[in-house]
Image (cartoon, grey):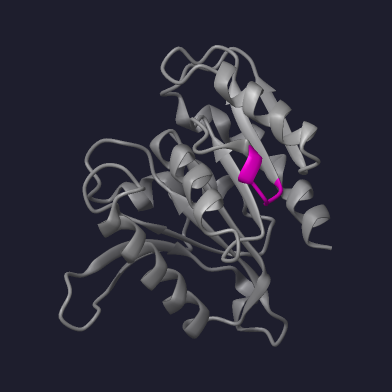
Amino acid sequence: MPLALPNVDTRSLEPAGEPPIYYSISIPDNAAAAKPVPLVLALHFGGDPEGAGRAVLEILVAQAFKDLGAVIVAPDAKGSGWSSGANEHAVNLLLDEMLKTFNIDKKKIAVTGFSMGGAGAWYYGMKYPDRFSAVVPVAGTPAGSPSTWKLPVLAIHSRDDQVVPIGPTRNYILELQKNGVRADLIELSGIAHHQTYRFVDGLRRAVPWLREIWK
């Protein structure tokens, strides 16, 4: 079992007149430094959303991105599907709160996610290209038309995923490349869809990719 990371904390944001937004957060040691740090929005997989933000951090994202030096924030979804109006509203409020709370480099904000969260990363990258600078979906189905996609994207997918097949991701990445978009795909082998912890090494390869995008 992956070990819980000591710098993962669970909190809530309580907007006036609205239900609380529960989220987990991984804060790097350098977050209090004068130099701005990156911000990563991490979207969790499907199932019961209670505590799922913390789970995706501990199992996957905080482990893979521990050397990135980024604030990583992972909300618990409000119901299923990150593209719902309630989730979009909550995510945007949470991102605004992160920008107020931490010294974030606004040119270094990425969105990632696994499975349902991977689809959510594609969705938010498509809908909010001015909010993010890079998208790293893991085991998620692309959203929307590649003709309107703008952001650099690194998709991570297993060839052996029988729940979310790799084919649509491959095709989407190829279309983006034809359109001149920076689009890369890391194909993994021997990993089933629900083996979230086995995607850590693949997602870790996004760290140098992000540093290149952000330099």
Q: Nearest the camera: 164 or 198?
A: 164
Q: Main secondary structure of the magenta part?
A: loop
Place residue 172 in its image quadrant: top right
- On screen, residue 90 above or below 56: below
| Percent x, y of residue 161 | 50, 16
Bounds of the magenta segment: 147-152
| Percent x, y of residue 113 | 49, 44
Quarter of the figure that contains the N terminus: top left
Task: Please report the residue visible at 43 percent of the width from the left and 49 percent of the height from the top.
Answer: 43
Place residue 87 in its image quadrant: bottom left
Task: Please report the residue visible at 41 percent of the width from the left and 23 percent of the height from the top.
Answer: 194
Q: Is residue 114 magenta?
A: no
Q: Nearest the camera: 33 or 73?
A: 73
- On screen, residue 194 above or below 200: above
- On screen, residue 164 above or below 153: above
| Percent x, y of residue 135 | 61, 48
Q: Nearest the camera: 69 or 132?
A: 132
